[in-house]
Image (cartoon, rainbow, N blue to C red):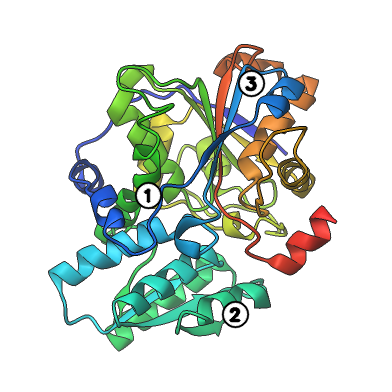
Amino acid sequence: MIDFYLNNPDNKLRNNLTNTILLKNDSLDYHKSLEGYLPTTLYKLNNLSSRLNIEELYVKDESKRFGLNAFKALGASYAIYKQLIIDPSISTFCTATDGNHGRAVAWSANRNNKKSIIYVPKQTTSDRIKAIAGHGAEVIQLDLDYEETCKYALEMSNKMNWKLLQDASWDGYEEIPAYIMSGYLTHFIEMEDSINSINTPNIDIVFLQAGVGSWAASCIWYYLNRYKLNKPKIVLVEPENSSGILQSLLSNKRITPTGNFDTIMAGLNCGIPSKSGWNIIKNGCDAALTISDEYAKKSMRSLFYPINDDKKIISGESGAAGLGGLFKLIEEEKYEQFREHIGLNSKSRVLVFSTEGDTDKKNFNSIIN
């Protein structure tokens, strides 16, 4: 099975609804208004970068974002804020999720005194379900995969007159996903006093884990909008058994991936890529790569057991996937062409995101112990 794709993007942004909403972004101002807002920490791991034989390695740690153990609150909270401006009478928000997005919707709905109905696919663990329910949501587990669960949430929202807050777009459903993507821009803007400097970025390569593609696309959009052709190279990383982005790139169109969807990286275990996310990804990503669960585990352990005075970072299965992609490219000699394509060498300055902490504590502990 082909496990990577080297893209030659045109690095251009298209004029469409998503681009218009992203250009009008005021997410950081909004998030600063919320109780508990703090910018998450950007760590520089000098000893791990030396071991990997690269110049610098940065990790943006999202595990403490609003106390929710993941970055997803940025998108959900901002989208709900915008929807309630448009229609304050909304009583119930609904979504499908494999964990973190659903918890973020439940948290955001609850703080606005609104109800939430959260549908989860069959493989969702009890820990993730409890975390969502802990914010007052009604959580319903279906005997369906992620993509089928999304379709069911859409059908029920239409039937019950709930407001669907899905982090994926399709024909006729693009505005709310664009507001979610706009909310994600906060953590890139938070780095504008450090590595995202004014004229040129102080990094060369960004590794992004990709599920349905909305978050990865928001990152690509940010760097394209800010730096144009001077943006860093961007590599998307997915589980080898659930790779909608890679398979769509190989097919040159959005497709539902084939595979058994058996992976510990629950937050990346998705189906067909988001329409608006896909349009940005194909025009702005430089490469895509799949990794095994073993690389995710190795990355989790590397962050949990730091080298010397590197900072200890608690990173979950999906949270560590970007670093797993970097490990794979460095450790396996057969990716020489890939490394050359993105300019990965001893002088590289690399950014990865730990997008979640120990969101499934039982599984996390079994891996790092």
Question: Distance between the Cα atoms at labels 3 and 2?
Answer: 41 Å
Find numbered disc 2 in the image and state the secondary structure of the residue it sits on. Answer: helix
Question: Distance between the Cα atoms at labels 1 and 2?
Answer: 24 Å
Q: Which is in the foreground here, disc 3 or disc 2?
A: 2
Residue 56 found in image quarter:
top right
Of callouts 1 and 3, which one flags the residue occurring earlier in the amino acid sequence?
Answer: 1
Mark linked to residue 184: 1
Q: Outermost residue toward the front?
A: 309
Q: Is residue 336 visible?
A: yes
At label 2, which amino acid type do we have? Answer: Lys
Is 330 rendered above or below residue 214? Answer: above
According to the picture, the residue beneath numbered tag 3 turns out to be 338
Q: Nearer the viewer, residue 58 or 326?
A: 58
Mark linked to residue 130: 2
Mark linked to residue 202: none
Residue 306 found in image quarter:
top right
Residue 319 image point, x, y percent: 61, 50
Q: Nearer the viewer, residue 197 or 341?
A: 197
Of callouts 1 and 2, which one flags the residue occurring earlier in the amino acid sequence?
Answer: 2
Q: Is residue 12 visible?
A: no
351 with respect to 227 (left or right):
right
Of callouts 3 and 2, which one flags the residue occurring earlier in the amino acid sequence?
Answer: 2
